[in-house]
Image (cartoon, rainbow, N blue to C red):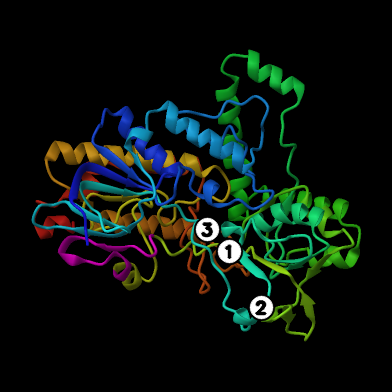
Amino acid sequence: MTGPTIKHDVVVVGAGFGGLTMAAELKKAGARDFLILEEGPEVGGVWRENTYPGCSCDVPAHLYSFAFDPYRDVRVRYPDRQAILTYMREVADRNGLREHLRCNASVVSAHYSDTDRTWTLCTGTGDLIRTDAVVWALGQLHRPAIPQLRGTEIFGGRAFHSARWDHTADLSGQVAVVGTGSSAAQMIPELARVAAGVTVYQRSPSWVLPKPAASFGPISRWALTHVPGLHELYRAGISHAADMVLAPIMRGGWSARPAELVARGHLRRQVRDRELRAALTPDYRIGEKRILLDSGFYPALTQPHVELVTDRIDRLSPDGIRTVDGTERRADVIVWATGFRAPAFLGGVQIRGRGGLDLHDQWRRRGRPTAFYGLAVPGFPNLYMIAGPHSFTPSNSNPSLKQHQARYIMRCLALSTGLGAPLEVTERAMATYLDRLDHALAQTIWCGGVATAWWKRADGTITNAWPGTVSEFENAITASDPSTSFVSVDTNAEARGA
């Protein structure tokens, strides 16, 4: 049974960094009739969902923050998840966003009406919400990926994904962690402090660079407190450094070799055992998969009660995990640190655009999910995305990309209002964009690389990552004119595809 239909000018779906950024842009433009739908009980996105021990950010806090309300704590260089969550809640309060927020409201479908040119969203509780425009800000790292292994149903202990942490589980016994990505690297040192034994199952090692201290020293704190404009200068400086130093690694550029030498030196200093060091040394180029920034992972693996296993998992047993060599290791708790179904954009939501066109069917026909600068798809008028396909940066701060997308969406909404009709991106603009995107992707080391990465599928198709710098994204999207890349749905079909 459905409730009454409510109407809003704009609906933003998601209250993480992307959703709050979009809402702040609407607020700044004077919009009053907009709604933020959040499936969880509070703002925060992945930082609300991930509660595993040791959860933190490996991007400096001043950069990993909102451009419209930047982080200004003079003590913290790298925040933990609670600090980020507190900051996001304070931003929502300071900027008057809560009056537009509706929590515990998931969206299961969105249908566009060719008759009245509006979208109707259906929530998980059956409520219907009509809107002139919808902005999806669901993020990319919130749908857990759990391997389908034999014996799962007979395992007698606790098993859960890192993003669905079971805080009732007893971690004092034998704990198995499957995966050695960013989440695993952060939680393993914490688990090693309380567990009798920790077994870490590694599919492939990661390149790890040393992480600076989490807090600023006294001189930096004094300077950030007393020097006018230093917060802004520091933020701009680390963003520029990421573009100039880290981004070239993804293309096999000048900084790849120095970065690899630093990573090898970091491993050599922290892991003295040659056999363990060999198992932790990647056999692929640095940058092919996400580089970790961490200084506690390697020391945790050297502890006598922590074991690294590189043999492939065969199955689960009632008492633990069996690998393909026949060895069975006991586990009272299994933590799946196995990442997310990131390429499944808007997964679980049925979306039908103009003429009943199904978004997921269209992506399947194209062979991959695609969107104009990660934010718009032909055939879906006034439907926008933040953090859609190919708009994740592995080398800088993703809130920055989301800010550029939100500002572009505001340009589209303003144009739509001026024309009195919804807009959709043209096939021609989409094709031109994809040609440039594919050319840029071909220049990266991801194409043809041997490493698996969460931003590409098993067949090697890259679905999530932006192949350039944040500055290049900003320049390209700023130069794009919505009045030529988008067309009113009132225009005839021939012009629409032009």
The mark lying in front, picked from 2 and 3, is 2
Q: Is residue 469 above or below residue 195?
A: above
Rendered image quadrant of residue 178: bottom right
Q: Amino acid at mark 1?
A: Ala
Please state if 8 lies on the left or on the right of 183 as rendered: left
Numbered label attached to residue 485 = none
Disc 1 and disc 3 in contact, CB within 8 angstroms: no
Q: Report the residue at 37% width, 29% height from top.
A: 96
Question: Mark 2 is on which residue type?
Answer: Phe
Q: Residue at x 32, y 73 (%)?
A: 365
The mark found on residue 155 in the picture is 2
Regarding residue 264, the answer to whether it shows in the image is no
Say which quadrant the C terminus sits in: bottom left
**Magenta region: which residues?**
346-361
For label 1, the SS is loop
- For the N terminus, the quadrant is bottom left
SS for tag 2?
Answer: loop
Q: Position of residue 27 (x, y in %)?
A: 32, 30
Q: At which x and y percent is residue 465?
A: 50, 56
- Residue 378 visible? The answer is yes
The crowd level at tag 2 (other Cα within 10 Å; few <14, some 14-19, many 20+) is many
Residue type beneath disc 3: Gln
Residue for badge 1: 453
C-alpha gap between disc 2 and disc 1 = 29 Å
